[in-house]
Image: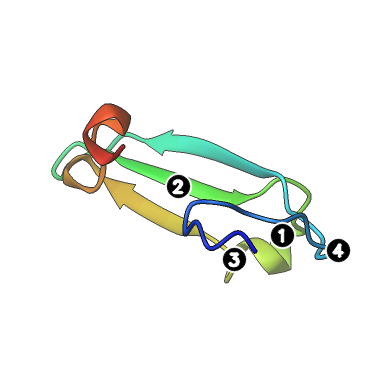
Amino acid sequence: MNTDADSHSPTDEPTTDLDHVTVENEDAPNECAIFPREASEDELMTNWITAHDESFVSLDTMR
């Protein structure tokens, strides 16, 4: 039995393709908005995530 916490088994769960856009703000930090690629306009009103500069970390640091 494999008990490695980093191993992942394939699932039958559907995946969602994501897209992103950078929102440039004049009086605040820029934001990255992440949302489902195939979302309708109604879905986009509630299915998104925003991230600010301090939200990002180096991939190498997290490994």
Q: In this view, does 63 lie to the left or right of 11?
A: left
Structural crowding at the residue carrying mark 1, measured as other residues with C-alpha within 10 Å and reported as few (<14), some (14–19) or many (≥20): few
Kindly indicate whether the residue at mark 2 contacts the one at mark 3 (C-beta within 8 angstroms).
no
Dot 2: element? strand
- The nearer-to-camera label among 4 and 2 is 4
Q: Name the residue under label 2.
A: 33
N-terminal label among 1 and 4: 4
Residue at 57% x, 71% y is 46
Dot 1: element? helix
Residue 33 placement (x, y as % from top left): 45, 47
N-terminal label among 3 and 1: 1
In space, the residues marked 3 and 1 are separated at their CA atoms by 10 Å
Above or below for 18 versus 41:
above
Question: Residue 12: which numbered mark, if any?
Answer: 4
Residue 13 placement (x, y as % from top left): 80, 65
Structural crowding at the residue carrying mark 2, measured as other residues with C-alpha within 10 Å and reported as few (<14), some (14–19) or many (≥20): some
Q: Mark 3 points at which residue?
A: 47
Question: Residue 41: which numbered mark, if any?
Answer: 1
Kindly indicate whether the residue at mark 2 contacts the one at mark 4 (C-beta within 8 angstroms).
no
